[in-house]
Structure formats: C-alpha cells, structure tokens
Amino acid sequence: MDTKLKLAIVAAFISEVLCMAIVLGLMLTMPDLPTTVRNDEICLPSEFGSIKCGSTADRLHEYLERTIAKKYDEIKTKDVKRQQEYMDKNIDHLKSTFDKAFLEMKPAAKLTGKDQPSIRKNDIGIEMTPVREWRHGRELYDTSGFERYGIRYRNGRLVVPVDGMYFIYSYVDLFESCNPSTGMPNVKDTTKPIQHGIFKFNILDGEEMELVSNVQPHKVSSNRYFNFYSSYVSSLVELKAGDELSVKVSNLTYLRYTAENSFGVNLI
C-alpha cells in the first residue's frame, strides 16, 4: 500500500478518536439532570448557577422574579444616573430659566372630605377601614385643596413621586349614634377605641405600615343621641417614590362629610 495513503488513513483515525474524546469529556462535565422529570416539572438555572428542577409554576415564578428584580435594579440605577447627569449638565440653564421657583417645586397635595360609598362586605368587622373617596382633581376647585408637582391620586390614596422627607396630616370628624335612654354608644364592644391613622403601602415591599394614628375611648353622650369626635394626626416621615398613603378609621359609618375633613402630604 502506498505510504501516503497509509498516513492519511492513520491521520483520519486519530482525528476521529480525538473528536470522540472531546464529546465524551463534554458529556462528563455537563451538570447532571434528574433521572425522572414529570410532565408538570421544569428545570431552570438556580440563583447559584446550577440546574434546579421542580413544579413548572414555582420554578418559572422564582426564575422570573429573580431576573426581573435584577433588570429593575439595573434600569433604576441607570435612570438615577441619567437624571443626575442631566441636572449637573443643565443646572445653570434651569436656574436661569425658572429662577428659584425651579428648586421650590416640591410635590404637595391636600384633599378634602367627600361622602363615602357603601361599605364593602370584606370591610365589615376589620379593625380599621380605609377612607375610599376624597375630593380630588377638578373637584378641588373652589376648595382649599390642591394637587401639585407629581402627586397622584388613586383609589383614595396619594402616591408620592420622589424620595424624600414628607409632612403628612389628616383631619376627620366622626359621629357615633347612642342609645337615647342611656346615652351609651350603640356598639357591641365599648373597649375597642375610636381610631384614626395614616398608612403607607408600596407594591415592592408588599406590606402596609402604620405611620401615625390617634386613639380615643368611647364616651357617654351628653345629649344622649350621638357623640362627636374630632381627630387630627400628623408626622414627618421618610418616603420613597411609589409609596401610597391612605387614611383609615375604625368605623367608616362614623365618618360624615364636612368641609373640614382633609388629607394632605408635602415634600419638605
């Protein structure tokens, strides 16, 4: 046999052996998968990089939540950096255009009282019920209320647009019916006090938090027909963009529309 042909055959054989060795090495280094994966399961990378299998819904939820949170942080960081770069670059122009008023455009709002809708079934029996309606937007014309510089109203709540220290406050008038023969409040348990407060919720935190509240005991009516309670709460609080503020009272049926009822927030 010709020597060149022999060399060609040997070279081809060696190449084939090398390819098989490479394929075998890749197979040996690949992460092991479970021997049995059910139809309702899926395998995805875990937070540590290894492959993890489990319920399709749970694994997809965990993977998407982790991925989205990472992307959100990246986008938020870039947006904050972009805003700061824009301010640094254009601060002289902005000051000359808007003068001092530009730096004094702080988010602020004051809502005024409004008749409340019927109580929802899931609100009956709970410790504190949110005030679901306030005068807002055009309804504030010819009132002392206002909404300025990014504060938004949504389903009875005020949503703050930027991080910062805010002054929050609320004033309500509450009327409680009493038994005319005794003057005692018409309630099942007089040990549960009259409560009024402001609460914070942020969808990223997933939990509601009480910021400030006022507690008053029930009292015997001097006129035997009703009790009148007035409550004012206020506080300085650190809030972040997207925080939603709401007012709650212990009994929504006690709340009556008056021009004085108010709910406000402003950046200081």
Image: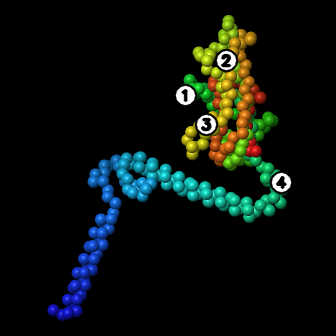
Whole-angstrom CA distance, mark 4 to mark 1, is 49 Å
Mark seen at residue 122:
1
Q: Earlier in the sequence, mark 1 or mark 2?
A: 1
Q: Quadrant of the N terminus?
A: bottom left
Q: Secondary structure at mark 3?
A: strand
Whole-angstrom CA distance, mark 1 to mark 2, is 24 Å
Mark seen at residue 7:
none
In this view, 119 is above or below 86: above
Write down the residue under mark 4: 100
Farthest residue to the left: give it: 1
What residue do we see at 36% from left, 48% from top?
54
Q: Secondary structure at mark 2?
A: loop
Asked if marks 2 and 3 touch (Cβ < 8 Å), the reply is: no
In this view, 57 is above or below 180: below
Q: Secondary structure at mark 4?
A: helix
Q: Amino acid at mark 2?
A: His
Whole-angstrom CA distance, mark 2 to mark 3, is 25 Å
The answer to whether 122 appears left or right of 109 in the picture is: left
Q: Earlier in the sequence, mark 4 or mark 1?
A: 4
